[in-house]
Image (cartoon, rainbow, N blue to C red):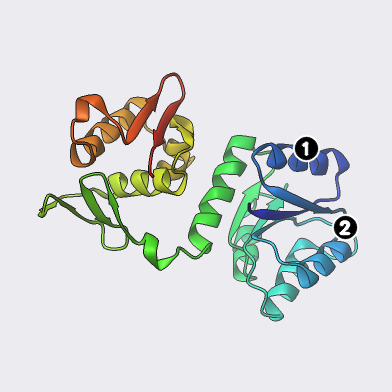
Amino acid sequence: MYSILVVEDEPGMLMGLKDNLEFESYQVDTAEDGEVGLQKIMNNTYNLVLLDVMLPKISGFDICKKARAKGIQTPIILLTAKGEEIDKVLGLELGADDYITKPFSLRELLARIRAVLRRTQTVPVNQDKLKIGRLQIDFKSFEGVVDGAEVKMSSKEVEILHYLWDNNNKTVSRDDLLDEVWGTEYQPTSRTIDNFILKLRQKIEDDPNHAKIILTVHGVGYRLVSN
């Protein structure tokens, strides 16, 4: 389970974030001012920090600067009501991994969190190369082999398959796939996802018309089944 520290001084926002993140199965710790937030970052291990910029006692920018100066590399997403370019540049230069401007949708925030965790969490070596059904896939080189013959794999096919594998035996919604693979700024229709799943099944399944590995969960999305 991923652990997230939320540093936010507005009580309603803090509790709203905590409740929604816990609903998404994250372990959540909180801090209501910059001083407490910095102490928790220094003394605990988290997978990610959601850090408001405008905080009492110590600003989010200063927290980010002090944490990085101490060699703490915990991923940080800055939360702020400011939208000026200079603030975004400053936050990233101080070591933040991403920056999201209030007001934001929960869906966008969750997509940003998943994207940062995916970029920053170490992938075990034994998961770089896998055999899924008939397909042998190298996630680093984007190379695929089916029945001894090399097959072309598009970057989107590989990203979709990687996300399904990371959530193997769990149902993944079409919206989650759209957020993870295409991001929140540009998104195709859910029909695009279905077309990519069809292509993956042709490489993976013994009989693509009767899928046993990438299953359709009607009205929701897909589930990759692995033993």
- Please indicate whether residue 176 sits to the left or right of residue 207 in the image: right
Task: Tell me which corner region of the image, top left, top right, bottom left or bottom right, holds residue 168.
Answer: top left
| Residue at (75% x, 57% y) in the render | 53
Q: Position of residue 135 (x, y in %)?
A: 22, 48
Q: Which residue is mark 2?
A: 33
Q: Residue furthest front?
A: 227
Q: Which residue is mark 1?
A: 16
Q: Is residue 177 left or right of residue 33?
A: left
Relative side of 172 to 138, left or right: right
- Observer-nearest of 102 and 18: 18
Say if residue 189 shows up in the picture.
no
Badge 1, how many Cα within 10 Å: few under 14, some, many 20+?
few
Count the marks: 2
Q: State the SS at label 1.
A: helix
Q: From where the camera sits, is residue 47 visible?
A: yes
**Label 2 secondary element:** loop
Amino acid type for the residue under numbered disc 2: Asp
The residue mark sitting in front, 2 or 1, is 1
| Kind of residue at disc 1 | Gly
Q: Quadrant of residue 59?
A: bottom right
Vertical position of residue 211 compared to residue 182: above or below: above
Tell which circle, 2 or 1, labels the residue nearer the N-terminal end: 1
Residue shown at the point (58%, 62%) measured from the top left: 97
